[in-house]
Image (spheres, rainbow, N blue to C red):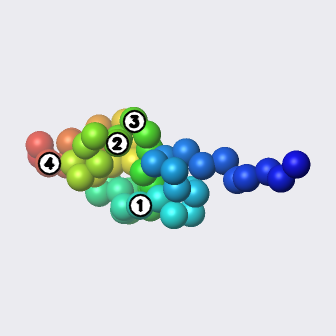
Amino acid sequence: MSRKAKTSGGGKLPSERPSKLCAACGRPFSWRKKWERDWEQVRYCSDRCRAVGKGKAGA
């Protein structure tokens, strides 16, 4: 039997998924299923970075 690479994320391989740079830490992060509907609005890679980013904007 032949095995295929597991593809999640819209049927794309992990290396083919879109990515962005985090607005708080500057690290790259890639598309996740939970961000499927609002990928255009996602700016931060994690809850921690979102808290840091919001703190900067409010100061």
Q: Nearer the viewer, residue 56 or 6?
A: 6
Would you say the residues marked 3 and 1 are in contact, meaning their CB atoms lie under 8 Å apart?
Answer: no
Query: How far across and down, in percent of the image, does residue 31 sit?
Result: 42, 51
Which of marks 4 and 2 precedes in the sequence?
A: 2
Neighbour tally class for label 1: few under 14, some 14-19, many 20 plus, Cα within 10 Å: few
Measure how far apart labels 4 and 3 are at the Cα level: 25 Å
Question: What separation in Å lies between label 1 and label 4 (alpha carbons)?
Answer: 26 Å
Residue wearing tag 3? 34
Residue pointed to by mark 1: 18
From mark 2 to mark 1, how far is it between C-alphas? Answer: 11 Å
Circle 4 residues within 10 Å: few <14, some 14–19, many ≥20: few
From this view, report whether residue 58 is shown above or below residue 30: above
Residue sitting nearer the eye, 18 or 49: 18
User: Is residue 27 visible from the viewing direction of this image?
Assistant: no
User: What's under tag 3, amino acid-wise?
Assistant: Lys
Residue under numbered circle 4: 57
Q: Residues within 10 Å of mark 2 (few under 14, many from 20)?
A: few
* Crowd tier of the residue under label 3, counting other residues whose Cα lies within 10 Å: few below 14, some 14–19, many 20 or above: few
Give the foreground label among 1 and 4.
1
Q: Residue at image x 45%, y 55%?
A: 30
Q: Which residue is mark 2?
A: 36
